[in-house]
Image (spheres, rainbow, N blue to C red):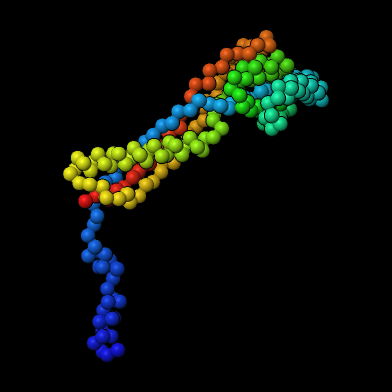
Amino acid sequence: MNRSSLLVALTLLLVPPAAAAQNVPEVPVIVTTGQAEVKKAPDRAWVAINAESRSKDPKEAQRLNAAAMTAVTEKLKGMNLGADAIRTTAYELHPEFDYANNRQTLRGYVARNAIEVRVDEITRVGDVLGAAVGSGATSVGGLRFDIRDRAAAEREALRLAVQDARARADAAAAGAGVQVVRVQRVEEQRMFEPGPRPMMRGVAEQSMAVDVAPPITPGTIEIRSTVTMTVAVR
C-alpha cells in the first residue's frame, strides 16, 4: 500500500459515526396507539371460608375450631370439587380482652381458620357457599371470578389491539396523503389489572342460619390490551 492509499484509509476510519449518520435521510413515521377489550364469561371462582371459635381455655378454642373446620372441609370434599380445590390460607389463635376503668381483663381465646376453595363449575358456587355455612363456617366472602385460559384471552386482546393500531396508522397516513410502507415497532403497554373485587360477604352472612344456596351472578371478565405502533411512511 502506497502513502496516498494509506492516508485515504485512515481518513475513512477517522470519520465519526455521527457524521456518517447525518448523511442518511430520516424516514418519516407515524405513531399510533391501539386498544382492545375482550369479554369472557367466567368459568372458575374462588371463595374464602372461615371458621371462628371461642373459649376461656386456648386448647378448647383450638379443639372447637378444629372440629368446625373439619366438618366444613369434609362436607366440601364430599362435593367432588377436586383433590387440590381446597387450601388453608390462614390460622391464628390469640387472646381477647375487655377494657374497663383503665383495666385489662382476659375475656378468653379465639381460634380462626381460613380456607380458600376453588370452584371449576360456576353453577355450583351457590351450592358451595350454602354447604360451607350449613356445616359450620362462621363467615364466607372474598368471592372472585376468573377464566381458566386467561393467557389465550390476553393474546386475543393483544392481537385486536395491534389491528386497531394498524388501522389508525393507515387512517392517519391517508389523511396526510402518504402511504404506510412498513411497521417499524410495536410495543405492548403492560398494565396491572386488579382482580374482581371481593363480594358476597353480606349475602353469605345472611344465609348462615339456613343451609341454602344464595343466588350468584358472575357477569363477565374484561381483559384489555394497549399497544403503541410506529410505522414508516412515504
Location of the N terminus by quadrant is bottom left
Is residue 95 toward the left or the right of residue 180 in the image? right
Is residue 151 toward the left or the right of residue 170 in the image? right
Is residue 127 toward the left or the right of residue 40 in the image? right
Residue at 50 percent across and 32 percent down: it is 194
Tag count: 0
Residue closest to the far top = 210
Residue closest to the far bottom = 2
- Residue 102 in sight here: no
Q: Quadrant of residue 49?
A: top right
Q: Quadrant of residue 73?
A: top right
Residue 66 percent coordinates (x, y): 78, 24
Is 149 located above or below residue 6 in the figure? Answer: above
Residue 13 percent coordinates (x, y): 30, 76
- Residue 85 in sight here: yes
Residue at 28 percent across and 71 percent down: it is 16
Residue at 26 percent across and 79 percent down: it is 11
Is 132 located above or below residue 150 in the figure? Answer: above
Residue 177 percent coordinates (x, y): 17, 44
Most foreground residue, 87 or 227: 227
Most foreground residue, 81 or 197: 81
Most foreground residue, 112 or 182: 182
Residue 118 percent coordinates (x, y): 63, 28
Residue at 43 percent across and 34 percent down: it is 224
